[in-house]
Amino acid sequence: MTKTMTNDDGAMRRQPGCPLCDGPGGRVVWRGAGCRVILPDEPDYPGFVRVVLDDHVAEMTDLLPSVRDALMRIVWEAEACLREVMDPDKVNVASLGNMVAHVHWHVIPRWRDDRHFPGSVWSAPQRQGEALARSAERAARVDTLVQRLQARLAAMPSADAE
Ligand SMILES: [Zn+2]
């Protein structure tokens, strides 16, 4: 991996009007070489993490394999942190990009009693009030999650050093 995650010439691609080019997309909890980890505003899903490439690229196969691998190492670190701190029944890892065609990975803690389980978080809700109360209880763990993410990602060997 080079200094950034851009493919070849090092020039960062930007798409005016893309929400992930125009802004961070959420609360930035970590920034690395060419990508960032954010907490989007998803009140039903405390601990929902997105790993966002800085470069405006639509598909993973637009990226060099080394860049792809570096990005996915961050996704797997995020998954590991979610499992340790949020104690989910399942983790959903997804890349859709139909609305925002800019590479980003959703890493989502899921619980059997969450608002949409067993559907995806984008499906029709299955339940209401009680799920919201539980999400508030789980939100208390988010600060710990952020600390764990920052510590684990800071401890990751950078590809430059490999
Ligand atoms: Zn973009």
Image (spheres, grey):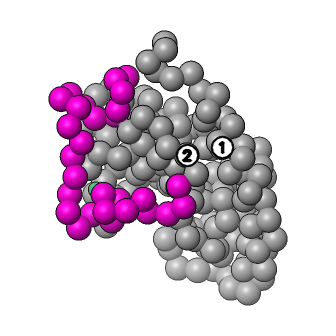
- In this rendering, position of residue 85 left or right of residue 6: right
Q: Where is residue 66, by image quadrant?
A: top left
Q: Is residue 12 magenta-colored?
A: yes
Q: Is residue 160 above or below residue 27?
A: above
Q: Is residue 155 above or below residue 45?
A: above
Q: Nearer the viewer, residue 99 or 148?
A: 148
Name the residue at the top extreme.
162
Residue labelled with disc 1? 149
Ligand 1 position by quadrant:
bottom left
Question: Element type at marker 2?
Answer: strand
Q: Where residue 30 sits in the image (x, y, percent)? A: 55, 46
- Quadrant housing the N terminus: top left
Report the Cα–Cα distance between label 1 and label 2: 8 Å
- In this rendering, position of residue 16 left or right of residue 24: left
At x 54%, y 61%, the residue is: 27
At x 61%, y 43%, the residue is: 78
Pointer 1 with pointer 2, Cβ within 8 A? yes
Span shown in magenta: 1-28
Q: Main secondary structure of the magenta part?
A: loop
Q: Indicate the amino acid at tag 1.
A: Leu
Q: Where is residue 108, by image quadrant?
A: bottom right
At x 58%, y 80%, the residue is: 125
Q: Nearer the viewer, residue 152 or 87?
A: 152
Q: Indicate the amino acid at tag 2.
A: Trp
Q: Where residue 11 sits in the image (x, y, percent)? A: 20, 37
Mark 2, Cα crowd under 10 Å, few <14 / some 14-19 / many 20+, is some
Note whether ligand 1 is within 8 Å of mark 2. Answer: no
Q: Nearer the viewer, residue 139 or 13?
A: 13
At x 34%, y 34%, the residue is: 5
Question: Element type at marker 1?
Answer: helix
Residue labelled with disc 2? 30
Which one is earlier in the sequence, the residue at label 1 or at label 2?
Answer: 2
